[in-house]
Image (cartoon, rainbow, N blue to C red):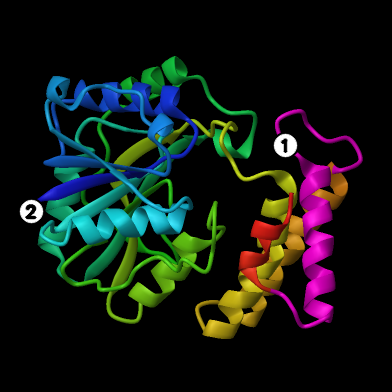
Amino acid sequence: MQVTVGIASTGRPAILRQMLKYMGTLADLPDKVVVSIAEPQDFDGPKPDNMPFELSVITSTKGSCAQRNAILRSEVDSDIVLFLDDDFLIAEGYVAELRRLFAQDPSIMIATGQVLADGARGPGLAFDDAAQMLGQAGPANPTRSMDIRSGYGCNMAVRVMASPDLFDEKLPLYGWLEDLDLSRRAAWRGRVVRADGLLGVHLGIKSGRTPGVRLGYSQIANPVYMLGKGTLGRRHAFRLMSRNFAANLLGAIKPPPYLDRRGRLRGNLIAMGDILRRRSNPQRILELD
């Protein structure tokens, strides 16, 4: 099965270059890598001719959903598009196991892997530490997979030919919960799974992310929007919103240097006010600073 790796990247050319070079060192390569950027300065190498796989760079409207959709539209002849964040490193054998998994079970629409360490939950991980962690991980169990509610957007493979769905571009910029929204729509037609044979490490680099106020607004407005369209239930939506609001409220007392908890809390409160005024809209983050 033909596997294309799709990477939507904005404002992080150095980590993107490092990640692509790392991927080029693997023995188990994808057929193609497509990088979707918003501005020319978002990509600063490596040169496509120097890579052991076909490397293509395309330009799209800024935003993770729009940039990922540009990749899907360009790769209609692929069997699988594996979406990776520009700071996610896959282990040796990931692509081969992905091919085996999708070929063995045609009902699988989306597959996500086992994240050995996730720097997004803390200050982030150093590139060399992540690479060393993958090298020491040992062989994965390629036979075990389980059905889950949602793929994790930092490493999420989509069956192209069987899945006409695109990411919802009404979730702008960082696209908070866009992976959950797509997964729930795909689950209406097939399986969404996590496979233990797909190993990786998420560095969780903080640069180039959506500012705190905007992200905080999305943490409330996006679940409300998804509740309205039917891709999120009331209980799950409330749990997501209350968990993030509580974390931001407590974190605002003494915020860590790597997270803008106070900005996120302010965004939460603005979104709650908009809900009361019946003007909540995920795209309103484009009006916020």
Give the image location of residue 11, x and y in percent.
Answer: 50, 34
Residue sitting at the far left? 1
Give the left or right position of residue 220, taking residue 230 as reference. right
**Cα–Cα span, label 2 and label 1:** 40 Å
Report the magenta residues as a range: 252-280
For numbered disc 1, what is the local secondary structure? loop
Residue drawn at x 32%, y 72% is: 165
Answer whether residue 279 is magenta in the image.
Answer: yes
Q: Earlier in the sequence, mark 2 or mark 1?
A: 2
**Mark 2: secondary structure:** loop
Q: Amino acid at mark 2?
A: Met
- Which residue is rendered at x = 13% and y = 56% of the image? 78
Disc 1 packing (10 Å; few <14; some 14–19; many ≥20): some
Q: Is residue 275 left or right of residue 177?
A: right
Q: Quadrant of residue 85?
A: top left
Q: Is residue 217 above or below residue 106?
A: above
x then y, percent, for residue 205: 54, 31
Give the camera-side residue of 32 and 140. 32
- Tell me the residue that label 2 is attached to: 1
**Crowd class of label 2 (few under 14; some 14 to 19; many from 20; radius 10 Å):** few
Mark 2 touching mark 1, by CB under 8 A? no
